Image (cartoon, rainbow, N blue to C red):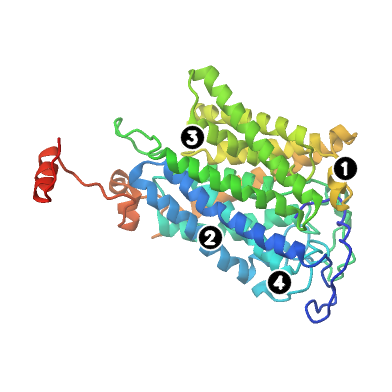
Amino acid sequence: MSSAAAAPTPMPASFLGSAANPSSSPFTETGFASTGFLIMSSALVFIMTPGVGLLYSGLSRSKNALTIIMLSYLSYAIVAIQWVIFGFSLAFSETGGLFIGDFNYAGLSNIGANAMLNTASTIPSIVFSLYQLQFATVTVAIIFGAVTERVRLLPAMVFIFVWTTLIYDPVAYWTWGSRGWLRNLSCLNTIVVSSDLSNIPCGIGSIDFAGGGPVHQASGFAGLAYSLVLGKRRSNGQDLHKPHNLTNVFLGTALLWFGWFGFNGGSAVAATPRAGMAAFVTTIAACAGGLSWVLIDAIRTKKVSGVGFCSGVLAGLVGITPASGYVAPWAAIVIGAVTAAACNASCLLKEVMGVDDSLDAWALHGVGGFVGNFLAGVFAQKWIAQLDGTSIPGGAIDGNPMQIGYQLAGAVAISAYSFVGSYIILAIMNKIPGLHLRVSPEDEIKGGDLGEMGEVAYELVETSLPDMKHSAKESGLTLA
């Protein structure tokens, strides 16, 4: 899914058996290695959605721990159905216009063993669709970190379907579609709606290897809109908004870090050295981000925060995402550290703004994706892209400062479109009877788990030492 400047050079064909690969546009690869690699990468990215749920659950109060996990699973289930019906077609059709795809792949028709020649020529299209599904699902799950502890589930389910259709699918198409306008910023006048797959634009424009714009900026700025529409969480001054389970925070971070190897590495859409480089710079940026955040917090608070480290790791991962298939390891250190510093500052800025971005969905993903897209324009290098035969003009350090302009244009467009579009969707929904977005004051006080689900993550048992001694005596035990 790399938005390369030109269509990637196909890998040498060594397996084109007509029985196993029957198509007028057969995929080209060596021994199905890339097909297996993308299926494995799909599984890695899948685990990121429950990982988001665990992370958010740990950061929430215990009475809302289950609701946010449920929202992550609901996001996956709803988006998966939408993806089959028409989502994949809108996001990746190769015969659409400059703004959105058409319905050529609706119901996953024309998807199977055939390759998508201008999008993913090295694997069967059904595998590419499976892989891209994971991106769409985790994107929506990220949004709810901005509004945890006060969001109703049923309206959220409607929002998931509508938002994916009207916001995510178009933005994904702009960025990765062969005729998307951001991918072809330098040659917009050549984009025409055509069924002729050989009639494709130049492919020189904004670059985004794995989703800094469609995934992180789109979700982060949608979360900002959601938090503004819902308003702040209620507090009685005693029930503080503090994480209830730091173990889940670390576990959720670990699952996300683990899945990000498939998120960025798999975006090479082939088992190539470029995929290995993308995976390597991903983990380097995560390390740099974690250390950067910890050091900044330590200077300010004189403490080494576990939550701060996890936040920094995620910021580094977000920042490297758009640049991962374009930059060298040394640049990943810079990108991770700078993005983490920017996100750390954004967490302070949101307090000044009076915005209750509950778990920093905007501060980490919205801001981090924006910064990462900008830095991709600075540090992108031709030799990195050429690891799989792709040709790009490179970034500023390769003598192409215009790339920064393309990156900023894409980052601003995606941020504005997601924020404004999401705000309009939410404002309309909030006026529809039965679809009001916020839980009642009573349900907010007792917690979303009981109020929205009638279930709880933890069963708390009240007891006392005399009761424990009596029970122990009946069991023939002695307590000191």
Q: Report x, y in % for residue 47.
A: 55, 55
How busy is the neighbourhood of tag 4: few (under 14 within 10 Å), some, or many (20 plus)?
many
Q: Amino acid at mark 1?
A: Trp
Q: Dot 2: few (<14), some (14–19), or many (≥20) neighbours within 10 Å?
A: many
| Badge 2 or badge 3: first in the primary sequence | 2
User: Mark 2 near mark 4, Cβ–Cβ under 8 Å?
Assistant: no
Residue 59 seen anywhere in this rendered image of the structure: no
Closer to us: 71 or 114: 114
Q: What amino acid is found at the position of numbered circle 3 in the picture?
A: Val
Between the C-alphas of marks 4 and 1, the distance is 34 Å
The answer to whether residue 40 is above or below residue 106 is above
Task: Tell me which numbered mark, 4 or 3, is placed earlier along the sequence.
Answer: 4
Q: Which residue is mark 4?
A: 105
Q: CA distance from mark 2 to mark 4?
A: 20 Å
Q: Work out how far the residue at label 2 is from the one at label 3, CA to CA, in angstroms.
A: 27 Å
Name the residue tied to disc 1: 383
User: Who's the residue at 46% across and 36% down the image?
Assistant: 356
Checking the image for residue 355, the label placed there is: 3
Q: Look at discs 4 and 1 and give the one toward the viewer.
A: 1
Kind of residue at disc 4: Tyr
Q: Which residue is mark 2?
A: 76
Asked if residue 16 is positioned above or below residue 406 in the image, the reply reads below
